[in-house]
Image (cartoon, grey):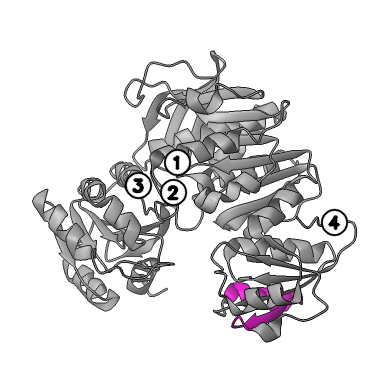
Amino acid sequence: MYKIDFDKPCRIHFIGIGGISMSGFAEYLHTLGFKLSGSDNHQSKITDHLVELGIEFFLGQRAANITPDIDLVVYTAAIMEDNEEYQEVIRRNIPMLNRAEMIGQLMLNFENAVAVSGTHGKTTTTSMLSLIFMEGELDPTISVGGILDAIGGNIRMGNSEHFLIEACEYTNTFLEFNPKRSIILNVDADHLDFFKDLKDIRNSFHMFAKRLPKDGQLFINGEIDHFEEFTSDLECEVLTYGILDPAYRKGNIAYDIAADKISFDDKSTSTFDLYYKGEFIDRLQLNVIGIHNISNSLPAIGVALQVGIPLEKIKKALYSFKNSKRRLEYKGEIGGVTIIDDYAHHPTEVIATLTAAKNYPHEVLWCVFQPHTYSRLKQHLTEFAEALSLADHVVLTDIYASREKDPGDISSKDLLRELEKLGTEVHYFPCFDEVENYLLQNCMNGDLLITMGAGDIVSVGENLLGL
């Protein structure tokens, strides 16, 4: 494998530079003095920003973009072997690294690299951790899978030994990472277009945990079924976290980091008692809704305590935390209807979001749901219906295909029928204009409307608000 010499910047080309992660690391390497170029099939605000920085951008992925002066090519997992640029790189025998391999090498430059993994909640927890480290004046380098207003984007270039990163399991990306500390938030069946089944996913997370060094630390959700399967053969220190409050806890387990006596106020902010290794520490407040966000905060608190950030700094950072973009994000209000947007695209995430929303002041709860990928909807059809039935009214759009092609054996109408079986008030519209017209005619003063999905469904709420 090609080894990057970070002390000797070279010429690097990124295939798929417009992605939120790829663009962030391109910007980071640019600041280190590397000469960067990149290509993407779509021009966007992200690529425009890279051009403003002085990074050369090619619209479209063509062989001509690959020139003899390129020392290394970095590509995303979405790039197929028949890609024209990829083929030209092979023809020219230019060294290549995938995005994860490049990040793994970069992490070795930091004494305290922290990787946040899990099938849900990675962006939220990484964002919380980022605010805590910045409040603690540790000047971290940060890579998060969403836009975090506090850092003005998805990446922050720090000047310290601390590196915080969101570690995605898809295509086993995180198995290239080299963290000192890792977090495992949850392990559910997802990305079944890549993984065989839940057992296969659990095996990957186990392998991820085993990448920790002997002097490393794993923070793992003790509510994960049989979590000991991930930890029994580890040589590093293992710290568990979870909910103690009997109204929310799922088991009868003692955790190293725990929340108890949870309460929500009329605006759905939450307070809880924090326990660390069995001792009461303090009462903390979050200004985001949902029991899942309390759970997400616990490993971030645990990591912060381990690196010596004062509790008052931790409390201040968490109190100031607002959801990152597309995570229970308040978009605005029109005609007395509150509009929130959320990225949830797995049944577990849908349940967490709608359960949290029930604590938000409202008369009627609406959910406009855009399924994300054919394979995910087909695999979890029944579970999606059960999760969405938590809403009073559901509006469905067509499936957002993302990287997939229509197999012809699954559609949003199948989900419609499953919801009808459960007695849920549900409607389906093939285009966003029809969705928006229906909502304008039927949502009432005091209602709460959530646009939900990992695709472009956010535009529905933004169009209603005139954003």
| Residue 258 appears in the figure | yes
Query: Given this view, does label 3 or label 2 mark the residue nearer the observer?
Result: 2
Task: Using the rendered view, name the quadrant where residue 49 is placed.
Answer: bottom right
What x and y, as percent, mark residue 422?
12, 48
Helix, strand or loop at disc 3?
A: helix
Query: Given this view, does label 4 or label 3 mark the residue nearer the observer?
Result: 4
Q: Is residue 130 magenta?
A: no
Q: Are marks 3 and 2 in contact (CB under 8 Å)?
A: no
Quadrant showing the N terminus: bottom right
Gap in Å between the C-alphas at discs 2 and 1?
Answer: 6 Å
The residue most toward the right is: 8
Q: Is residue 52 magenta?
A: yes
Q: Is residue 390 left or right of residue 33?
A: left
The residue most toward the top is: 278
Q: Which residues are magenta?
A: 45-62
Name the residue: 53% across, 30% down: 220
Gap in Å between the C-alphas at discs 4 and 3?
Answer: 42 Å
- Residue matched to label 4: 6
Query: Given this view, does label 4 or label 1 mark the residue nearer the observer?
Result: 1
Name the residue: 70% across, 35% down: 180
Q: Is residue 108 left or right of residue 149?
A: right
Amino acid on which disc 1 is placed: Asp
Name the residue: 83% across, 78% down: 69
Label disc, if present, on residue 195 of the rendered structure: 2
Task: Using the rendered view, name the quadrant where residue 224 is placed.
Answer: top left
Amino acid on which disc 2 is placed: Phe
Q: Nearer the viewer, residue 433 or 119?
A: 119
- Residue matched to label 1: 200
Amino acid on which disc 4 is placed: Phe
Q: Earlier in the sequence, mark 2 or mark 1?
A: 2
